[in-house]
Image (spheres, helix red, strand yellow):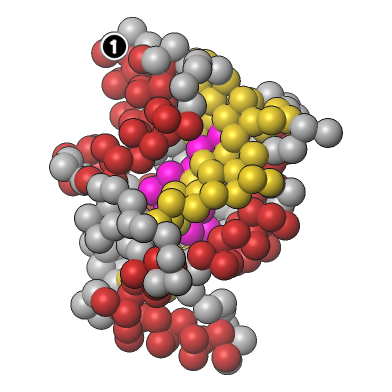
Amino acid sequence: MSDLSNTARRQGPEPAPPAPNGPARGITKALWEYVSRPDIALQYDSYFRGMGLFAFDCQVLDLLLPKPGRLLDMGSGTGRHLVHFARRGFDVTGVELSQHMIGVAGRKLAAEHLSARIVQGDFCEMPALPDESFDSVVCMFSTLGMVKGRANRTAALAEAFRVLAPGGIFVMHAHNRFHNLFISGGRIRLLASYLRALAGRGEVGDLIIDGYRGVPKMFLHSYSARELRRALDRAGFSGIKLLYLNEERTNVIREGRLAGLLSNGFIAAAFKPVS
């Protein structure tokens, strides 16, 4: 996918770049179907209209990013953060695998006469983006969790760290592994992840969700709070802070010993140290 990662442009009403010829690093067959289907991209915004997390994560990001700067959205999708931050005067760039979502994002930007650079490719490898070229990097709506394999997720975090300027902030969302104890079918999926891990066929927290948006066997890695902190720390980030989301994902719950169990997910913020 590194050849596609070198394809970048200012997004306006132009058609999206051609689709890749095969799955990218860490992308399952199911996710490849998901990003390749035009109906999913075209219906994405309407499908998630009213999603509480979409309003709340913007509120959190606005508090964490009070001043316009250079922002990278890893897995920019149909451009909700690109549009939001372009409106605020940020210099925005997105990396997105789906040509169809890039097309939707481009039309939304063009409709508001906004500009964004969108790179089609795999955010586990972003050679088109120079070192230390962004003041902030975001990876929201559990996008990192859709990448299969710890080594691939580690590579994505390393890329986020690489392109972030010293003192810059990285913000991401992840699903909480233990929230599956409280939702329909969650206990079975969680138990299956432990059994597959014991058999050497995956990692604890790897969930297989059948029939999501009509796609069979969608992959999602769900984190524990400890695993997420450790992954960010090993990538080199400091000042790591986790926000524990409530059931509706419209606010945070109080930190405490049970927060990592009861939370419906995490928003993590971390910084690249100034050397």
Q: Residue at x 25, y 60 (%)?
A: 247
Residue 127 counted in the magenta span = no
Vertical comparison of 45 with 14: above or below: below
- Provide the residue designation for mark 1: 112
Q: Where is residue 254 in the image (x, y as percent from the top left)?
A: 36, 58
Q: Quadrant of the C terminus?
A: top right
Q: Quadrant of residue 101?
A: top left
Residue 141 counted in the magenta span = yes
Q: Which residue is drawn at 72% across and 57% down?
A: 234
Mark 1 nearby-residue class (10 Å; few <14, some 14–19, many ≥20): few
Amino acid residing under circle 1? Glu
Horizontal side, residue 220 vs residue 252: left or right: right
Q: Residue at x 64, y 54 (%)?
A: 232
Vertical comparison of 133 with 21: above or below: above
Task: Give, as a single range, the part of the protein colored magenta.
Answer: 137-149
Q: Which residue is drawn at 63% across and 26% down?
A: 134
Q: Where is residue 56 in the image (x, y as percent from the top left)?
A: 30, 40
Closest to the observer: 160 or 107? 160
Q: Quadrant of the N terminus?
A: top right
Horizontal side, residue 205 vs residue 226: left or right: left
Q: Quadrant of residue 107?
A: top left
Which element is circle 1 on?
Answer: loop
Closest to the observer: 163 or 20? 163
